[in-house]
Image: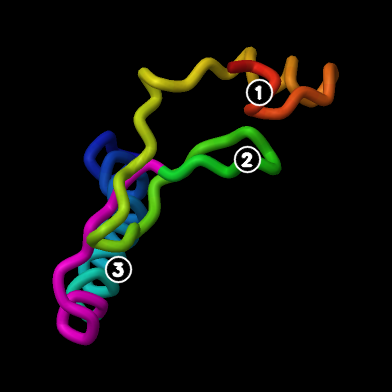
Amino acid sequence: MEAQLIAIVIFVPFTLVFIYAGIHEYQRYKSQGRANYGLVYDEETGTTHVTGIAQHEDGYDPIEFDPSDHNEREIRNDTDDDRA
């Protein structure tokens, strides 16, 4: 195979996914209006992910969070009141 053909075979799937995501986001924009995306923290799993958030809500700020504290509180069964 030629180098150009190999490059095209590798590049085409990424291009198709990018185009699909763009079309999907455009359709969402037309139906729901402007979206506010931000980092959201899931307390059950201790993980974060990027998703749409409401206009009146603030996104998760990783600077204000200590991930080791999440695991320690589960072990010690502390509440937020006990830490203060």
Give the mark, 3 or 1, whose residue is nearer the N terminus.
3
Query: Which disc, if any, is residue 53?
Result: none
Circles 2 and 1: CB distance less than 8 Å? yes
Kindly identify the residue that appears in the image at 28 percent across and 40 percent down.
7
In space, the residues marked 2 and 1 are separated at their CA atoms by 8 Å
The kind of residue tagged 3 is: Tyr
Circles 2 and 3: CB distance less than 8 Å? no
Q: Which residue is mark 1?
A: 70
In this view, the residue in front, 6 or 21, is 21
| Position of 32 relative to 46 (above/below) | below
Mark 2 surroundings within 10 Å by alpha-carbon count, few (fewer than 14), some (14 through 19), many (20 or more): few
| Position of 60 relative to 57 (above/below) | above
Q: Which residue is mark 3?
A: 20
In space, the residues marked 2 and 3 are separated at their CA atoms by 31 Å
Residues rendered magenta in the picture: 28-39
Kindly identify the residue that appears in the image at 23 percent across and 81 percent down.
32
Give the mark, 2 or 3, whose residue is nearer the N terminus.
3
The kind of residue tagged 2 is: Glu
Query: Which disc, if any, is residue 43?
Result: 2
Kindly identify the residue that appears in the image at 84 percent across and 19 percent down.
75
| Position of 14 relative to 32 (above/below) | above
Element at badge 1? helix
Q: Is residue 48 left or right of residue 58?
A: right
